[in-house]
Amino acid sequence: MALGKTPYFEDVAVGLELPGLEKGPLTTAHLMRWSAAMENWHKIHYDKPFAIEHDKLPGLLINGSLKQQFVMQLIADWAGPQGWPWKASFQFRAMNLVEETVRVWGRVTGKREAPDFGLIDIELGIINDAGKESTPGTAVVALPYKSGKPVPYPFVPPNL
Amino acid sequence: MSAFSDSLKKYIGMKSETEIACDPVEQGAVRRYAQAIMYEDPIFAKACENNERYGGPVAPPLFPTHLFRRPLGTEDPIQANARNPDFDGIVAATSSQGLPNIEPLNGYALLNGGSEIEFFRYALRGESVKLVSHYADIIEKETSKGPIVLVVTESEYRTGEGELLIRTRRTQIRRK
């Protein structure tokens, strides 16, 4: 099978910026569509009086559960079909409000060699139109060696 | 330690039963989910070169974590709370991870504080998904905006055959 768009471990340098993702502007229609898809109906995402008056929030919030999908997309797309988006960790430190456009970013911070594939450490986050960071986090992506096989699937974590 | 703290501590370590999602991974549900997250990768739609080694069309990475919905024939919380001004719209069947409600936090607002995710395998169309969770920690904190409670839940999602799909460690922020 062709490697497709998966980068090789050797070709990735610390400091490399991952291709970013932009989502938005995220309207109440987007948030309702997400609520319907996951069948949960937390009012802080579509009922403005409830969000502001009852829960004392500044407005309708973009779901954390939606933002985490964007993080996974960032690393899964970059890992490509022969790599693997093993880990992601993030904190929702600030709120993103409806109508914001969010940009998901990632930067390589480290590389580790395992016997059968390499691990790429990534710092990531989500910024809004004003450049404010809301979701700092990290990720680990497994990539194949040039002389090696695709990353095993299902993924088996290495003993490091 | 306060009575409130004591009442929270007893939930730490509490485990769910193994819960099986009421529906398997369905093509229509995957399509709606992929469209809702605006991630319309062909690997979710049809057999193609890029999902060959996964065994065919798959669901988006975190899809199994949102597959636990209210089964037919169970109480409808939206109708049951239609006149409840404090009902926040959260459907326990889809958000509790199979764990019991933390009674001392009734009436507390809920915000998503973040997650740690380990991803091992995509769920394939037609597969069932099962879930086991436990409360890993419950922490009271003082913040500039008042007291909050952090509820940390760890969950494992597996196929019906027992293959590990995803592990999560989620933090919910609860506040008055």
Image: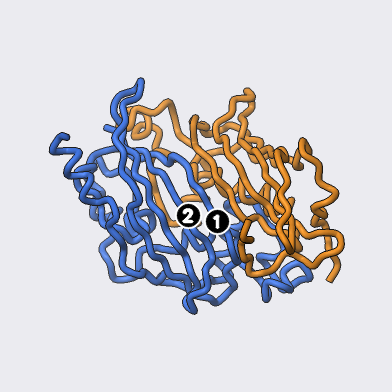
The mark tally for this picture is 2
At label 1, the amino acid type is: Glu
Question: In which quadrant of the rendered view does residue B91 lie?
Answer: bottom left
- Residue extending furthest toward the bottom: B161
Colour of chain A, in one word, is orange
Vertical arrangement, residue B98 with respect to residue B38, above or below: below
Residue at mark 1 to residue at mark 2: CA–CA distance: 6 Å
Viewer-nearest residue: A98 or B172: B172
The disc numbered 1 marks a residue on which chain? B
At label 2, the amino acid type is: Thr
Looking at the rendering, in which quadrant would you find the C terminus of chain B?
top left
Q: Position of residue A125 (x, y in %)?
A: 61, 36
Vertical arrangement, residue B27 with respect to residue B33, above or below: below
Q: Which residue is mark 1?
A: B118
The disc numbered 2 marks a residue on which chain? B
Viewer-nearest residue: A107 or A44: A107
Q: Residues within 10 Å of mark 1 (few under 14, many from 20)?
A: many
Looking at the rendering, in which quadrant would you find the N terminus of chain B?
top left
Q: Position of residue A155 (x, y in %)?
A: 63, 65
Vertical arrangement, residue B75 with respect to residue A32, above or below: below
Q: Which residue is mark 2?
A: B168
Residue at the spot 84% in from the left edge and 51% down from the top edge: A10
Q: Specify whether B90 is left or right of B25.
A: left
Q: Specify whether B134 is left or right of A94.
A: left
Answer yes or no: do the residues labelled 1 and 2 have beta carbons within 8 Å?
A: yes
Viewer-nearest residue: A112 or A23: A112
Q: Secondary structure at mark 2?
A: strand
Q: Residues within 10 Å of mark 2 (few under 14, many from 20)?
A: many
Q: Position of residue B119 (x, y in %)?
A: 57, 59
Q: Which chain is blue?
A: B
Vertical arrangement, residue A9 with respect to residue A24, above or below: below
Residue at the spot 23% in from the left edge and 46% down from the top edge: B9
